[in-house]
Image (cartoon, rainbow, N blue to C red):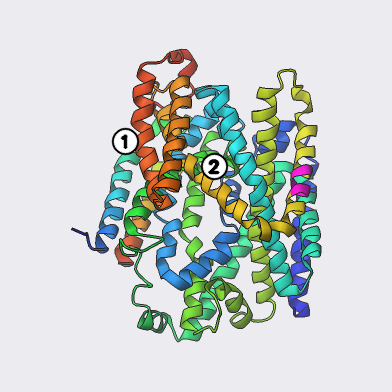
Amino acid sequence: MELPVIWANYISIALFLALSFGVWSIPKSAVVPEKYDGQSWRDLRVWATGLIVFQIVLYAYFT
Amino acid sequence: MHPIDLAVVIVYVGLITFVGIRFSQRVKTAKDFFLASRSLAWWVIGLSIIGTNVDTNGYIGASGNAYSIGIAQANFEWIGAIPAMIIAALIFIPLYWRAGVYSIAEYLGLRYSQAVRVMAASIVVVMSMFAMGVAMWALAITLQTFIGWPIWLGILVSGTVVGLYSVAGGLGAVAITDSIQVCIMFVCGLVIIAIGVSDAGGAGSFVSKLTAENPTHLSAYLPADHETYPWHGVILGLGLVLSPAYWVGGQAILQRTLGARTQWDASAGMMFAALAKTFVPVLIVFPGLLAIVMMANIEYPDMALPWVIKNVLPVGLSGLMFVAIIAALQSSIDSSINSTALMITRDIRHVLMKNHNPESDLKIGRLLTLGLLLSAMSIAPYVGNLGGIFNFLQLLLSLFQGPMLALLLLGALTKRATATGGIITLVSGVTLAGILTFVVKLNLLYVAFISFCYAVPALWIISGFTQPHSDEHLKTLTYSPWDER
């Protein structure tokens, strides 16, 4: 049985959600050096989350 | 070409050459030349990565593909890049940076063995030499199409300009000029969108005109029975194997992150590149769609972008767009030359010539950069005849991607992978990929996925029976932030 093409979008969105869980499982100390403590914009996990949300929107729109 | 367009081109060439040569004054050692003295800021790294990534195929070929298959072409910029770039930024770049290596091959040498290092470097060097010739040829063809220069003159002028800043200034000059080039590319992309959507009568009208006769052109994926880009293959082969192999193991891409001023800048640079990458379809996919909406009368899809430049952009801007195409090609050539010179100088020469003198790395690196540039310029006029060989080499390179990714992943994330396991897995994995490609004649996307699925357990099992490196040796070569909590 062949899955409809729309499933490719669902799978992509699921992969991006799984990636965001992986990103937030990385401890902050591995991403932000101590000297930047208190500068939340330097937390690359936040950058990654922004990118992932954008990708999810793209794959939800272009179906 | 209109005189105003020509003036724009001359100003661009002058600016790039000036910036590149100014940078040459900072180069005193091999580290300055190959890693920009570890001084690059995150935003320079990000823009330079995109400049290196968007090449001939990216610009002209992708617009042509978008004309044929629509927005599905953007998968190469989205699921075929973003996840791998995030993983590279958060896991692999910190690892390479802490290991203090100049190249990915050097990391593989430390993690596995010098044999794996030389093998990985040799594959990339051979492939890069042909790829540079192809890029130089494409640059000359572009100059011939727009200005009417003969091929030899195009090769001579573009080779001289690239040579002036990459031989003199090394990675620092390459990264700065790449950044300028990418800014030009994005300005042109935005102008094309504004003019294109306006001419089409607004965004709504643009979409309805596009989908009237091409209803799937705004679908991200193509059916499973599509000959070239079936959606299973795109997700499994491109998204899970080929893209990570490129973004966590591509030397030309990652070299600028190794030249970062701090580890944070290195990772943030890749993350910034991912943000820019999300918008790259604006540059390379939209012109193909615009050509459909404007009912371009073109003979074949690759003519979509040249048609848009000629028929949509006003005088001055078409010169700037022409500059953007030259910039895309130049930034790929300069990065490739610099990274190839690095791998020959260190990963091949240092390993094979036991009595090498590290003090002469800068001199040899510069001579190699010049030699590689001259060889690319020599190969370029004959690329039409070498097309078959180039395609074959590209095919061979793709056979390494699945097994190489397995080596990088297990090498970085576990202490289990061993030197013997690495060599056996690499050789047997490439053999399997060769059989699947040449005997079974499977789509390359599936070959990459299957060879990766073979290599992971193979490396895991074989390593269980062979001698591992000591924990002390692996301390800076494996990623384990959870242990440090």
Counting other residues with Cα less than 10 Å from the Cα at mark 2, is it few (<14), some (14-19), or many (20 or more)? some
Counting other residues with Cα less than 10 Å from the Cα at mark 1, is it few (<14), some (14-19), or many (20 or more)? few
Chain at tag 2: B
Q: CA distance from mark 2 to mark 1?
A: 26 Å
Could you say which quadrant of the image residue A22 lies in?
Answer: top left
Boundaries of the magenta span:
B371-375
Residue named by callout 2: B250
Could you say which quadrant of the image residue B417 lies in?
Answer: top left
Closer-to-camera residue (B407/B227): B227
For the residues labelled 2 and 1, say whether their Cβ atoms are less than 8 Å apart: no
The percent coordinates of residue B373 (x first, y second) are 75, 48
Residue named by callout 1: A25
**Residue visible at 37% across and 49% down in the picture:** B446
Instruction: Give the residue at the far front of this rendering.
Output: B439
Quick check: B298 above or below B161?
below
Q: Was residue B372 drawn as part of the magenta stretch in this picture?
A: yes
**Residue visible at 47% across and 69% down in the picture:** B66
Q: Secondary structure at mark 1?
A: loop
Q: Nearer the viewer, mark 2 or mark 1?
A: 2
The percent coordinates of residue B3 (x first, y second) are 78, 79
Amino acid type of the residue that numbered disc 2 sits on in the rendered structure: Gly
**Residue visible at 24% across and 59% down in the picture:** A7
Q: Was residue B448 drawn as part of the magenta stretch in this picture?
A: no
Q: Is residue A32 visible?
A: no
Q: Is residue B132 visible?
A: yes
Could you say which quadrant of the image residue B367 lies in?
Answer: top right
Chain at tag 1: A
Q: Secondary structure at mark 2?
A: loop
